[in-house]
Image: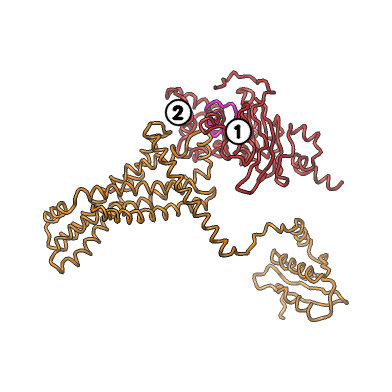
């Protein structure tokens, strides 16, 4: 073993019968690899039985926590083999740290057990959680309906100023992103339609395609999803943070219902804004289709517009706007639900936000599927 | 219903709050069991105990945020958890709560925070409300901060603003959840003086959760000591008296910052 003044080194020496002296030298703060306890273990295994372990640190020039950790391992080695651990030779600081570390015995039940729950236990826990989730979902829905009822009777603890503020945040301020996404969707629909329809010389029907698809489906779905990511997530984060700060508890102790005071304005704002945003989205999307058709295909602006007007029926428009309104409710509902369910930590607020968006988008797509089936059955 | 500012210290033998056989639990995990205590009207009652002993949880049971697993709380002899929701809300309107670090509504200014309960529960004119808000903020030394948002002021100011809001409806009972948490010694002493001032001038009954020894000895007329290990309360009484008379090593260790137990250990 090459030995320089600064490199950490370990020498094991049997001084007298039953006594093993460990000579530690060099700078144990060095970033290089430290000697391992294995060396000691090996020499213990090789020779005759050893009853005690002592240290010689005359040539030790420096140490840090890694050195202490090394000594702790030596001590536990001694414990395992029922040997005497003689720490008197160690530096004063190290001995103090060892005393401190051993001052409070390990709390056996504090360690989190690593045993994995069995399949059945997992299944059961998930089932219980799922059931509780479903009950929570319905309870929150019921409370919301009651609160809306209170609002209609003029008895809710509700401030229109709050609702107007939320309306501003989720309505006018969302116009930019709603316009951009829906314009692109209109563009894409027209492109896809144009390629296929051109082959049959039916390019003019691009107007029908874009108009109907937008007004019945894409306008409200895209707007719903945008608002879910934008506003639903914000609701969950706001309410979750208010929960962490005990602001919601403060409302409750004043006898003010958090549902009427916080959730209701958000619900009302989205219910009022979504239909307007949907109509806006429809118009922008049709404009997207218009650009492609007039630019790429040989369709005059007048032709396109008159075809669009002809294709869109009032019931389709109403269906789209109605669905938009419902999606608005879903976004507010899931956002507020997850916010109110949030735990009391920063991580819990993050999780609440994620769950709000995931639940919201899932609910929007799933309910749109149900709407499609219903409309088909009712010939709408 | 409201007490006025001339209210004097009232007959202190009248029992304002009674905690009877209260057991607190999170699901099946019992935090504390069999708590029995009486809070006299016009007194400062301190709930003390080590961290994690359930002091704040007990407070949440007193202010209607958690339902007891067993037992009940009585306000003026009336069962609090036996009331219907409407009656319980009415009872809570007579209470003011100062949460840890204020819990001010962050989307509102200080003035709006204090004004909200007034607007909800009184039919006063806007200018009356404004005057009361100014007065309450002035009482806690926040004159001129009406239009600040909670995020724009310091922690100590937030606690005081929370107190102004808790006092908005001239409550008969004030609850404080660790009022001096995170405050420097001087600010927390000022807060203690304010608490005593409120007791004497408003005649309010005050319940404080804290583990700050200087506060405990300065403000407490009466107290209970909760112990996490035995999961129940170990003593009720005036802290100074308890220190003189109690032979409970754990309580003495708590009240002397461990000096007693160390001496006890060496003896």
Q: State which chain is coloured orange.
A: A
Question: Is B232 situated above or below A39?
Answer: above
Is-magenta flag for residue B172?
A: yes
Q: Earlier in the sequence, mark 2 or mark 1?
A: 2
Q: Position of residue B88 (x, y in %)?
A: 54, 32
Q: State which chain is coloured red.
A: B
The residue stretch that appears in magenta: B161-175
Q: Position of residue A259 (x, y in %)?
A: 45, 39
Mark number for residue A55? none
The foreground one among B18 and A16 is B18
Q: Are marks 2 and 1 on the same chain?
A: yes
Residue A41 location, quadrant? bottom right
Residue A102 location, quadrant? bottom right
Which chain hosts label 1?
A: B
Mark number for residue B119? 2
Q: CA distance from mark 2 to mark 1?
A: 22 Å
Report the number of discs.
2
Q: Secondary structure at mark 2?
A: helix
Question: Is A316 situated above or below A44?
Answer: above
Q: Secondary structure at mark 1?
A: strand
Which chain hosts label 2?
A: B
The residue under the point 63% across, 64% down is A115
The foreground one among A119 and A47 is A119
Crowding at dot 1, Cα within 10 Å, few <14 / some 14-19 / many 20+, comes out as many
Which color scheme does this rendered protein use? by chain
The foreground one among B252 and A16 is B252
Q: Position of residue B96 (x, y in %)?
A: 56, 31
* Residue on which disc 1 sits: B175
Circles 2 and 1: CB distance less than 8 Å?
A: no
Q: Position of residue A277 (x, y in %)?
A: 29, 47
């Amino acid at each position: 073993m090459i030995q320089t003044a600064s490199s950490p080194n370990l020498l094991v020496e049997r001084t007298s019968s039953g006594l093993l002296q460990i000579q530690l030298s060099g700078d144990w703060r060095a970033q290089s690899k430290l000697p391992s306890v294995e060396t000691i273990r090996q020499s213990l295994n090789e020779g005759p039985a050893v009853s005690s372990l002592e240290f010689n640190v005359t040539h030790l020039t420096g140490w840090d926590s890694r050195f202490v950790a090394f000594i702790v391992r030596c001590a536990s080695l001694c414990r395992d083999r029922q040997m005497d651990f003689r720490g008197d030779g160690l530096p004063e600081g190290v001995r103090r740290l060892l005393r401190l570390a051993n001052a409070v015995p390990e709390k056996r039940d504090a360690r989190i057990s690593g045993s994995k729950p069995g399949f059945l236990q997992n299944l059961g826990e998930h089932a219980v959680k799922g059931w509780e989730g479903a009950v929570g979902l319905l309870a929150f829905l019921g409370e919301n309906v009651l609160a809306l009822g209170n609002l209609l009777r003029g008895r809710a603890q509700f401030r229109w100023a709050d609702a107007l503020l939320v309306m501003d945040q989720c309505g006018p301020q969302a116009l930019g992103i709603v316009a951009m996404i829906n314009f692109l969707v209109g563009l894409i629909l027209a492109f896809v339609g144009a390629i296929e329809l051109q082959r049959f010389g039916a390019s003019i029907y691009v107007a029908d395609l874009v108009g109907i698809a937008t007004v019945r489906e894409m306008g409200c779905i895209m707007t719903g999803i945008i608002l879910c990511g934008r506003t639903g997530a914000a609701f969950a984060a706001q309410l979750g943070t208010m929960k962490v700060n005990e602001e919601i508890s403060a409302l409750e102790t004043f006898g003010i219902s958090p549902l009427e005071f916080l959730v209701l304005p958000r619900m009302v704002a989205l219910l009022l804004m979504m239909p307007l945003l949907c109509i806006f989205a429809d118009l922008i999307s049709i404009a997207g289709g218009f650009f492609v058709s007039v630019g790429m295909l040989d369709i005059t602006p007048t032709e396109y517009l008159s075809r669009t007007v002809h294709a869109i029926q009032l019931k389709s428009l109403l269906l789209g706007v109605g669905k938009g309104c419902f999606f608005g409710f879903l976004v507010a509902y899931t956002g507020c639900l997850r916010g109110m369910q949030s735990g009391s930590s920063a991580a819990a607020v993050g999780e609440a936000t994620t769950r709000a968006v995931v639940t919201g988008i899932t609910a929007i797509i799933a309910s749109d599927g149900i709407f499609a089936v219903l409309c088909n059955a009712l010939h709408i | 219903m409201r007490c006025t500012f001339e209210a004097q210290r009232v007959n202190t033998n009248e029992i304002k709050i009674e905690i009877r056989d209260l057991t607190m639990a999170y699901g099946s995990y019992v935090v504390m069991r069999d708590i029995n205590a009486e809070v006299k009207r016009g007194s400062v009652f301190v709930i003390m105990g080590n961290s994690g002993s359930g002091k704040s949880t007990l407070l949440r049971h007193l202010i209607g945020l958690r339902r007891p697993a067993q037992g009940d709380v009585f306000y003026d002899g009336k069962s609090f958890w036996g009331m219907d929701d409407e009656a319980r809300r009415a009872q809570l309107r007579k209470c003011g709560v100062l949460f840890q670090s204020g819990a001010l509504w962050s989307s509102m200014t200080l003035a709006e925070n204090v004004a909200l309960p007034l607007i909800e529960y009184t039919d006063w004119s806007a200018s009356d409300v404004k005057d009361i808000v100014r007065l309450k903020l002035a009482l806690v030394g926040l004159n001129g901060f009406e239009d600040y948002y909670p995020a724009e002021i310091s922690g100590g100011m937030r606690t005081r603003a929370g107190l102004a809001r808790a006092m908005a409806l001239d409550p008969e009972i004030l609850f404080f959840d660790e009022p001096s948490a995170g405050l420097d010694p001087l600010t927390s002493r000022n807060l203690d003086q304010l608490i005593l001032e409120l007791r004497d001038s408003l005649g309010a009954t005050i319940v404080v959760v804290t583990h700050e020894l200087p506060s405990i000895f300065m403000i407490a007329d009466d107290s209970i000591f909760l112990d996490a290990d035995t999961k129940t309360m170990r003593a009720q009484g005036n802290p100074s008296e308890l220190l003189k008379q109690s032979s409970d090593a754990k309580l003495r260790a708590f009240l002397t910052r461990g000096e007693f137990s160390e001496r006890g250990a060496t003896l």
